[in-house]
Image (cartoon, grey):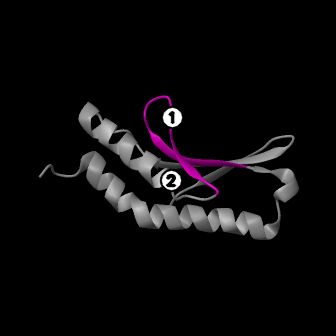
């Protein structure tokens, strides 16, 4: 289970989902950073980002003028899809055995 945080601003709605803690190994951290940047290329409505400590998040921002029930449902669906599709691979990169 994951928690989606929504932050309502004057003109935008921001979302954030904690995806994965940063690996301690610097080589793995670098590999994971490259991997999430490559995933960002195909994402719509959300993106991977790295927090101050190197943890990985899914974040996005939507103008309130575009906010509808359907759009909110789409954002939640995209977040669910990204976590289901990429979490296992990200864990393997960050913490899995080296081959």
Residue located 43% across and 34% down the image: 54
Residue 48 locus on image (x, y percent): 51, 47
**In magenta segment, residue 54:** yes
Determine if residue 10 is in view: yes
Residue 41: mark? 2
Local secondary structure at mark 2 = loop
Image position of 63 (left or right of 3): right
**Residue at x-position 82% and y-position 59%:** 67
Q: Give the residue displayed 68% in from the left and 67% down from the top.
A: 74
Q: Which of 1 and 86 is in front in this view?
A: 86
Q: Up-down: is 49 above or below 87?
A: above
Magenta stretch bounds: 45-61
Work out whether mark 1 precedes mark 2 in sequence or the reverse, and give the earlier one.
2
- Residue lying furthest left: 99
Residue 21 x/y as whole percent: 40, 42
Give me the disc on residue 51: 1
């Amino acid at each position: 289970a994951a928690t989606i945080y929504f932050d309502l601003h004057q003109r935008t709605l921001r979302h954030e989902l904690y995806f994965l803690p940063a690996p301690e190994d610097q080589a793995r951290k670098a590999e994971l950073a490259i991997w999430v940047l490559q995933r960002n290329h195909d994402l719509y409505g959300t993106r991977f980002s790295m927090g101050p400590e190197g943890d990985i998040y899914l974040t996005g921002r939507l103008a309130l003028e575009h906010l509808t029930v359907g759009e909110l449902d789409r954002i939640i669906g995209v977040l669910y899809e990204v976590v289901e599709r990429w979490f296992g691979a990200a864990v393997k990169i960050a913490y899995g055995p080296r081959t």
